[in-house]
């Protein structure tokens, strides 16, 4: 069975939707293939914050001094200068137009009076969608694609790229329920299949440290098939060993703890001994490494009512709070004794730690770990405490692309007819992706890939 389109997009996450809609708006006949029963991928379960320097919320909040250049420096530095300079430059320059496109064309509702301050960013620059998850993005993306008449075929798994005699990519072989289908692409194929965090074998091969000792925050679809498909026709793969863990995840499921939002508004981290051991706004890799060095390879985050008022960590994530309370990894108490007793943390240690943090909150200077923001005074309850562990979150490596999202071969030459965007690519984040740079990356390069493939 053959279906003929101009552009075939593989993977219905944020990158794939951006590519499909952009290609369609450029006049191309587009199809979007998704192997899972539902669209959204990891883009759906993400917090979906989006970093964009100079954005409209910054203006409203009076945050000054941010620039594309600063975002560039932060991204490069955060990835130990291992990101591809031209690709990173393209991402930061197109970040704000991409966010405006999401707002104005897709209809994503961003919070108008609130931004996120993620580790490694030197300014508060990350836009937050309504609900602080990817749901608003994916709902609006789906509605927009439907309005454009773009077929989204779920349960359709891309297996192989098809090429003509000249080597140009001309289509995709896929399967549904064991039956084979071929989707021909007159103009091009966009790979937007996400990363490989859910593929333990691929992780182990790329970097044995991140093998079966870790759970993952990812959806089960993140198996790296786009990387394998492209590699099989000569695509260059880079940075595969660079794997990021998210520091605070559910020890039972591996999922990101959404209540960890509290950490960005002042929650402190302590170990089983009740002592701080790392700066709470450090990079994800540094924090994860520090947590793995503590007793039991886990830690606790602690916050109070004042921090809840600022972060809405509890009120925004009631479902999670219910589960965590039942599984015993979250506890609320009026006193420090109450939270210490619950997890058998030495109460004197914890009291001393909190007294010291209160002192730092007063002086504005953390003499122990140089906290980059200002601590909140923790003298008054109620208190919440939750346990967390690092879990595999993002695979920085993948297909090598250029700023036009063309997939490159071993000689850095574009493979005709093939584009890629999103986590499947390996050039943006270097050794360590900064929080909220993923959404920026997937949407910026999804749009570029869609526009280029439709030409
Ligand atoms: P990104 O953030 O880069 O957009 P996501 O994880 O959000 O990545 O989305 C990738 C999507 O691609 C997921 O929905 C995933 O199920 C889908 N996908 C992965 N492999 C395939 C495949 N072989 N065929 C079709 N869809 C795929």
Image: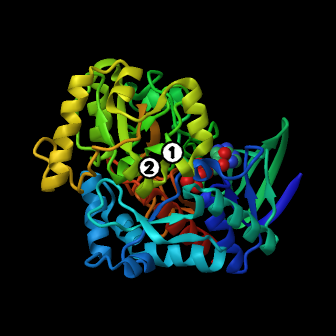
Q: Position of residue 269 (x, y in %)?
A: 30, 37
Q: Is residue 356 left or right of residue 186?
A: left
Task: Please give left or right for residue 156 compared with residue 258 in the image.
Answer: right
Q: Is mark 1 within 8 Å of ligand 1?
A: no
For the residue labelled by badge 2, is the local secondary structure a helix, a strand or a loop? helix
Residue 455 lies, with reference to residue 331, above or below; the image says below
| Residue behind mark 2 | 261
Residue drawn at (37%, 73%), measured in percent from left and top?
A: 53
Q: Secondary structure at mark 1?
A: helix
x then y, percent, for residue 356 = 16, 40
Q: Is residue 427 above or below residue 349?
A: below
In front of the other: 426 or 43: 43
Q: Which residue is mark 1?
A: 258
Q: Nearer the viewer, residue 207 or 44?
A: 44
- Horizontally, is 374 left or right of 166 in the view? left
In this view, the residue in front, 181 or 56, is 56
Instruction: Confirm whether residue 433 shows in the render.
Output: no
**Which residue is at 35% across, 60% downward?**
117
């Amino acid at each position: 069975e053959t279906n003929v389109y101009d552009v075939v997009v593989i993977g219905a996450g944020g990158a794939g939707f951006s590519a499909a809609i952009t290609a369609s708006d450029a006049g191309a006949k587009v199809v979007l293939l998704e192997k899972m029963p539902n669209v959204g991928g990891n883009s759906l379960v993400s917090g979906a914050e989006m970093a964009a320097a100079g954005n409209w919320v910054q203006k409203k909040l009076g945050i000054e001094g941010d620039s594309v250049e600063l975002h560039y420096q932060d991204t490069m530095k955060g990835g130990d200068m291992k990101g591809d300079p031209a690709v990173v430059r393209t991402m930061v320059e197109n970040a704000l137009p991409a966010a405006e496109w999401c707002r104005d064309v897709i209809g994503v509702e961003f919070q108008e009076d609130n931004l996120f301050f993620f580790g490694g960013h030197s300014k508060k620059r990350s836009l937050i969608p309504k609900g602080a998850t990817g749901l608003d993005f994916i709902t609006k993306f789906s509605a927009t694609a439907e309005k454009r008449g773009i077929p989204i075929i779920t349960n359709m798994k891309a297996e192989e790229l098809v090429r003509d005699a000249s080597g140009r990519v001309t289509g995709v072989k896929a399967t549904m329920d064991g039956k084979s289908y071929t989707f021909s692409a007159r103009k091009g194929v966009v790979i937007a299949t996400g990363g490989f965090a859910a593929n333990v074998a691929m992780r182990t091969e790329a970097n044995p440290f991140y093998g079966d000792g870790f759970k993952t925050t990812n959806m089960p679809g993140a198996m790296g098939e786009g990387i394998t498909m492209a590699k099989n026709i000569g695509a260059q793969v880079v940075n595969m060993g660079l794997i990021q863990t998210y520091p605070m995840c559910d020890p039972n499921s591996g999922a990101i703890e959404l209540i960890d939002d509290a950490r960005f508004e002042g929650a402190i981290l302590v170990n089983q001994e009740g002592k701080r051991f790392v700066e709470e706004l450090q990079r994800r890799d540094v924090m994860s490494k520090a947590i793995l060095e503590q007793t039991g390879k886990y830690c606790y985050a602690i916050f109070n009512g004042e921090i809840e008022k600022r972060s809405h960590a509890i009120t925004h994530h009631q479902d999670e709070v219910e589960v965590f309370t039942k599984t015993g990894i979250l506890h609320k108490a009026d006193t420090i004794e109450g939270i210490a007793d619950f997890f058998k943390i030495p109460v004197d240690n914890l009291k001393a730690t909190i007294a010291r943090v209160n002192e730092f909150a007063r002086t504005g200077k953390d003499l122990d770990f140089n906290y980059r923001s200002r601590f909140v005074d923790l003298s008054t309850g109620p208190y919440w405490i939750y346990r967390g562990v690092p879990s595999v979150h993002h695979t920085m490596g993948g297909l090598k692309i250029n700023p036009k999202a063309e997939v490159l071969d071993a000689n850095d030459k574009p493979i005709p007819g093939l584009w890629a965007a999103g986590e499947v690519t390996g050039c943006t984040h270097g050794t360590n992706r900064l929080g909220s740079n993923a959404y920026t990356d997937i949407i910026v390069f999804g749009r570029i890939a869609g526009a280029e493939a439709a030409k």
